[in-house]
Structure formats: C-alpha cells, structure tokens
Amino acid sequence: MKYKIVVAITALLILLLMYSAGAKAIQWGDYAQTMRNQPLPHWLTQPLTVVIPLAQLITVACLISEKFRRTGLFASIVLLTLPTFYIIALLLQFFPWVPCSCGNAFRWLSWQQLLWLHLSFLSLTGLALRLMVTKRFSSPLNVHV
Amino acid sequence: MKKIKWSLLVVALAGVVAAYANKRPAHSDPDFHTYAFWKYSDDGSRMYYTYDLTQIGYVSGNDYVCVQPGMACTFIASPGLAHLDPSGKYFYTSDVPTSGIITNSYFLDLNF
C-alpha cells in the first residue's frame, strides 16, 4: 500500500515537472523573457534560465528510476522549496516590483494560487519521502530503499 | 531496465503533451504593443497603465491577455513586459516605447 502511494505521488511529481519543463522548452522565447523580467540580478537569471528546466528533467529521470527515486524526491523538495520562498518574497513585496505570473507553465494562476500549488506538492513529496524511509517499505521489484 | 516503471514514462510523456496542448495561442502581431504612460516611479522607471483594448477592437485571449493577480492587460506577444506594481493596478518596464500609445504604427503622445 505504501509503495502504491509513493508511486502515485511520484507520478504526480513527474507530471508536474514534465509539464513545467515541457512548457519552458516549447515556448523558450516567452520563458526566457519572463526570466529576464524577474526582479533578480541578471547574473542569476541567465544561468537559472537553463538550470531550472535541466534540473527538472534530471529529477524526472531520477523519479522514474526505482534506484534513484529517493534522490529524485529530495531533488523535488529542493525544486519546490526554492520557488516557494521566491513566491513568498514576491507576495511580501521584498522586491521593487511584482512580475506577472503569465510567462510560466501555470500562467492562469495568480502568485497566491501558485504558492498553494507548491505547498501542496511539497506536502505530498514530504509524505512520499516519509513513507520511503519507514522500515517496512519495499517495492515489488525488491529494491530496498 | 527492469527497475524503470514504464507507466511513469507514460506519465512523463503525458506531461509534455499537456504542455504542448496548453501552448499559448499565436499572437496577431509580435511587435505591436499598447501601453499608456502614467508616471515615473520612485526608482525613475516609467510606469504605464494599459489601454482599454476591447474599445479599439481587440479580442481578449486572441490579441491580448489580462494577467493575474492584477487586471493589467498586455499583449500575448510579450507577456513578460508587464510588471505589476504592488498595488496590482499598473505596471512599469523599461522595454516599452518611450511615450504614448502606438495604434496601427501611429504614435500618440500621451505624456501628461
């Protein structure tokens, strides 16, 4: 049962990350421009433009593999936590302006809604990791994690 | 390869398909923007408000899009140009034309 829950959460994470990375790749111009307009220094946004989708793809690869699933879940925690703090900082007006959220994969969501989305997935990922570290967890493929 | 769950690969593929299906619709003219100058902000940036695009014949979702959480509207062609100020009513950017509204390539001076 625990294994099935972990696989279900993993599937949701894969869907989220692939949708996000796919949207970036398909509309790279819009995505790159949105990144340029974030209230962050250019020396940071330029590498982030490439690093974020790349990290998402690597995380998905880890999540798909039974062997590296736990690594993938930890990477997902990082990938979800960093934007969560960024969104909180935006909403608390730590930056000189609030960019529109229209360039990202979930462009129909407001920053508040995006924050709830991230928090929900963070909770799910935390649950999956917690289930994985319990002693009685084992996959049907006999990969003990 | 036995350690790969193939159903998860299908889910990954579904994510890409969803991203493609949700692709932003093509815009009518990528170089056409409509902004109205409002004032200079505290940091010296020019602040703009959006023109009522429906009154000049534009179709929401086709020629322009209103972005959340504010109701600032911008063209789909360059959504990244819209920067909402904390009030959510106006936006400012250094990338838009230096003055006025551009309508059919005609430059109107709206600096007031």
Image (tube, coloured by chain):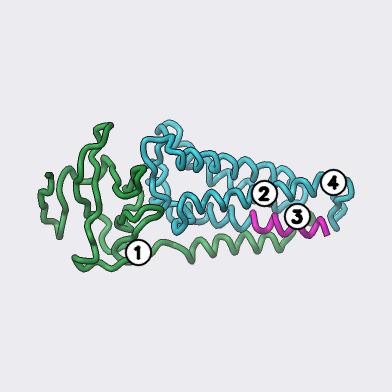
Chain colours: A cyan, B green
Question: The disc numbered 3 marks a residue on which chain?
Answer: A
Give B80 or B19, whichever is nearer the viewer: B80
Mark toward the viewer: 1 or 4: 4
Mark toward the viewer: 3 or 2: 2
Name the residue that disc number 4 marks: A134
Label 4, secondary structure: give it. Answer: loop
Label 2, secondary structure: give it. Answer: helix
Say what amino acid the circle numbered 1 marks: Ala
Give residue B25's position: percent from left, percent from top. Answer: 38, 64
Give A60 or B81, whichever is nearer the viewer: B81
Q: Determine the CA span between mark 3 and mark 4.
A: 12 Å
Which label is found at residue A6?
3
Q: Are marks 3 and 4 on the same chain?
A: yes
Which label is found at residue A123?
2
Mark toward the viewer: 2 or 1: 2
Q: Which quarter of the rendering shows the C terminus of chain A?
A: top right
Circles 3 and 2: CB atoms closer than 8 Å: no
Say what amino acid the circle numbered 3 marks: Val
Name the residue that disc number 1 marks: B26
